[in-house]
Structures are given as structure tokens and as C-alpha cells.
Image: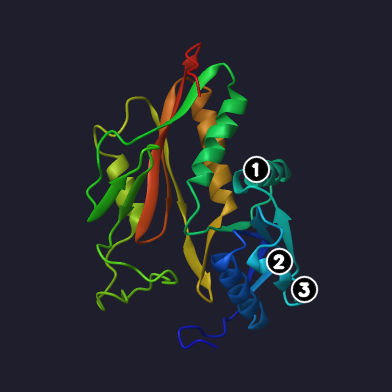
Amino acid sequence: MPATERAPDRAQCFGAIVVIGGGCYGSYYVRQLRRAASAGAIRCRELIVVDRASSCAVASTLDDAVLPARLVVAEWADFLRGFLADVRSRGTTDDAIVPSPLMPHLLRDWLVDAARERWPARGVRTAPLLRAPDMPWQQAAPDGTHYVSFATWMCPINCIEPATCPHTRGPRAWSMAPALRAYAERPGTSERPVAGPFLFRCTHRAWGVGMIDVRDVLAADAELAQRGAAGPVEALVGTVSHCHGAVSRIVVGGAGDRRPD
């Protein structure tokens, strides 16, 4: 057992755990989740690994009996579109997503797709931030996603963001979600009535694996549907950990103002 882990008092229980990507990162996450399951740290109904290649690195490693696992060969966005719609229809709340460090803003894009399906005659689009947040490091991407970080150094890919920062060796006195909530409350961050902010937090669960709770994604979709039913609305949407994040806006216009995609 790693020195930073200890046997839990009881297992964390999940429905489906979805690992995004079956390459080097996905293989590492599957290996660590098996170790966590063997140690009694987690239990799940099934482990799903999503990759567009049937020959991905994790494909030959899913025959272990410790966790019921399967590979789904699909594009990430296509899989999540069907998976999240199915979970929403079933009303379950115990599924989780293990994101890839290399994945695009998939959960924001699912919210956009769901809103466009809900309101086909209305303009639904992503938009860049109206003003930059106060962060030590940030970078605006051409697609409107704003990447932010409290770190001005290179973090190890498997850092679990503990209470003591491995780089500074001092207390981690920061967390992205409360910082972005404070940012969203300031004047000048929106042009319309505001929903959210919707912040999908990837937090460490066991043996170096971070997860996002699917119930948070579905709650964001439900609130956007409710607020958008009353008229134009927008929301700050972010996929974040304690130290890093990808944020942008979703803008839902009124009837008849549909814009080309």
C-alpha cells in the first residue's frame, strides 16, 4: 500500500465509474482503481473505459476479476452524450467520471448539446469570459475556454493536491471552486440573468485517482433548463480541481435568435 494511503473505514460506493481514455493515463487509473478495490477503498457496479481505439493500451488488461470492467470503443463526446442522457432518464446519482488530463471541455459541451436539443429554436452557444479572473496563471484558448491555475510551476501529473503542496512544501491555501464562485459574483462577469456557476470538481478519491460526480453535471443541466425556461440566461461553467481549471460561459438566448453553430 502506498505510504500516502491507508485502509479506509468503509468503501466508497459508486454505480458506474467512467474512465476517459484508454491510453497511458487510462491504464494508470484502471490499475490504481483495482488496487483501491483490492484494499477495500472503493466498490462499483462497473468500470467503463472509453477510447476510440479497440487496440488502446488498456484493452488487454480488463480481464481482472477485482473490478467488473469493459471497454467502450467510441469518441468521448459521443459516449458521454448517450451515457449522461441515460443516467438522467434513470435518475441515478452514484456514477462518477475519471477525466483525462488531455480531454477537452466535454462536460460543458454536453450541457450545450442538451440545451440545443431542449430549445432548437433558440441560440445556445459557448462564449469566452467577459473579463479575466485574478489567477497566478491563465491562458485564453481560441475556442473560448479559459485555462486557469494557482500553480506557476509544472505540477506532477499524478498529484492528488494534498493539504500540503508538494512543490511549495507549505499549506495549500487555495481552491479553485470557491475562487471561481467569488469571481462569478462580481459585476461585469455576465450580460444576462445568471445560472450557476456550474463547477464540476475533480477531487481525489483513492489511490491517486480523481473523479467528478455525475450528479453535479445533471444538477447543472436541470438548473439551466429551469432558468432558461423563463428566458435568456447564461452560466459560468468550469471543470476544476483544487489547483487548476477550464472555464467558459454558456449563453442561452431568447426565442427566434438562433445563431449558426
Q: Position of residue 20 (x, y in %)?
A: 59, 57
Viewer-side residue, 174 vs 123? 123
Residue 35 falls in which quadrant of the image?
bottom right
Amino acid type, callout 1: Asp
Q: Any mark on residue 10, and which?
A: none
Amino acid type, callout 2: Ala
The colouring scheme, among rainbow, by chain, secondary structure or one colour, is: rainbow
- What residue is pinned by disc 1? 78
Q: Earlier in the sequence, mark 1 or mark 3?
A: 3
Q: Position of residue 56 (x, y in %)?
A: 66, 63
Q: Nearer the viewer, mark 3 or mark 2?
A: 2
Mark-to-mark CA distance, 3 and 2: 9 Å
For mark 2, give the secondary structure.
Answer: helix
Q: Is residue 19 above or below residue 206?
A: above
Asked if one can make out residue 41 in the rendered structure from this viewpoint, the answer is no
**Left or right of residue 112: residue 194:** left
- What residue is pinned by disc 3? 63
For mark 3, give the secondary structure.
Answer: loop
At x 55%, y 46%, the residue is: 217
Q: Any mark on residue 59, and which?
A: 2
At x 57%, y 16%, the residue is: 121
Viewer-side residue, 178 vs 39? 39
Mark-to-mark CA distance, 1 and 3: 25 Å
Structural crowding at the residue carrying mark 3, measured as other residues with C-alpha within 10 Å and reported as few (<14), some (14–19) or many (≥20) = few
For mark 1, give the secondary structure.
Answer: helix
Amino acid type, callout 3: Asp
Q: Is residue 155 above or below residue 73?
A: below
Mark-to-mark CA distance, 2 and 1: 19 Å
